[in-house]
Image: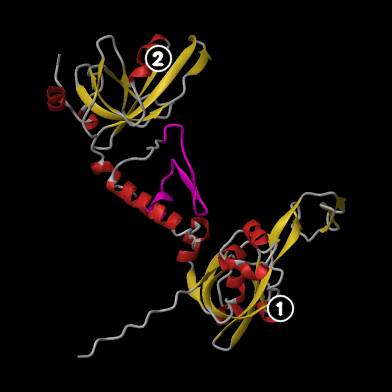
Amino acid sequence: MTSLEELENQCLPISKLKKYATEWVIKVLVIRRSLTKEYKNANGEGIHWQLILVDEEGTKIQTTLFNKDVHAWNKSFQLNQSYYIINGKLNGAKPNFLSVHKDLELAFMNNTDVVEDKSQFKTEQFSNGFISFDEAEKITNGSLFGDFVLSTTPVSSLLINPQFEKANNLQEWNDNMKAQKIDLSLMPSRLMQTARQVKITNILNGSLAIVKDMYYKFNAMVSGIDNNTDPWYHACKKCYKRVTVINSNATCTYCRTEDIDYEARYRLKIDVTDEDQFLRITLFDAAKYFLGSHVKDYVLSTSEKKEESEYYRKLVLSKGKEFSILVKIDRNFPNVEANMNVIAMEIHEVPKKKCSRSNQG
């Protein structure tokens, strides 16, 4: 029987395999096992099962097994385990079906053999190839919407708890955030980070471009809080207007409906100033960034002793602090000079700059 060392020496990267070749050895990691599915078409009916594999160069290949081959090989491949595959057939990728390899698809034959790899599968060559969201947006076979939503294709691959440097660093960072009780959903979004920086003056004088929807951010100091005693209200889930609640039953006068579904919703008004310019900011969902909590958590924490709530204290102590505020400017943007009121999309406290003191000797 061929030893693991001999198999390692005989291995070829998937990129070196030729179409229709039948004698070769590859070492691959299982990164996807599909469910066994039934099929029925003009050629017959039965079951099929798919594997997606990757080699140490990061090249992927897939195989689809049918009927008796499903039963023969289903228990031989475990997710996140690596194997040597000896012999098989390399067919051309079917043009009418999605494939992880543009040219090849693996088929098992009677002389195909599979040996479990006992060594650590090396992922360094492809696992360090992470790309930024800016680059990912240019990819056409997946899509990004907003900040964190990613759509995939039926052949997209996902590694569960992969063991390589960048993944380990990311996991360590995530663990540290949890240890510090930092809610990642309340951190500045990518939109907040990339928006153009302006001043309150630009917001007030209408000098910003409104050819299309644009997002701008500006820094200002909180000079006043309009409703710090009650920064939320019971809102109709349909129209978001305030409802009247009596014995847990809500009536929405706007929808003209009784016993309507309702929820707690933020509505907080703050006054901000910068360089003698004044602006009133209304915060709806954006108040979660300002207070550091989602509305349900805020309501719960202030239901008994409000003064002991860390979120309420954060609200009261925000006066005099500087914040970065994100707003959306479009053709429907209000005449700010007339009503001096703007709805914020996000708001985050600006960290104070640390003063460095040089040592004198």
Left or right for 177, reference 86: right
Q: Position of residue 118 (x, y in %)?
A: 22, 28
Amino acid type at circle 1 is: Asn
SS class, disc 1: helix
Residue 206 in view in this figure: no
Where, by quadrant of the figure, is residue 7 drawn? Answer: top left
Left or right for 233, reference 110: right
SS class, disc 2: helix
Instruction: Look at 32% across and 48% down and name the residue there.
Output: 168
Amino acid type at circle 2 is: Val
Range of the magenta residues? 131-156
Instruction: Look at 81% across and 58% down and name the residue there.
Output: 243
Q: Residues within 10 Å of mark 1 (few under 14, many from 20)?
A: few
Asked if residue 99 lies in the magenta stretch, the reply is: no
Q: Which mark is residue 70?
A: 2
Q: Nearer the viewer, residue 240 or 304?
A: 304
Left or right for 19, reference 170: left
Q: Position of residue 181 (x, y in %)?
A: 48, 58
Would you place residue 326 above or below residue 300 in this image? Answer: below
- Marked residue nearer the N-terminal end (2 or 1): 2
Q: Position of residue 340 (x, y in %)?
A: 67, 79
Q: Is the Cβ of the residue at disc 2 closer than 8 Å to that at disc 1?
A: no
Instruction: Give the residue pinned by disc 1.
Output: 339
Left or right for 284, reference 37: right
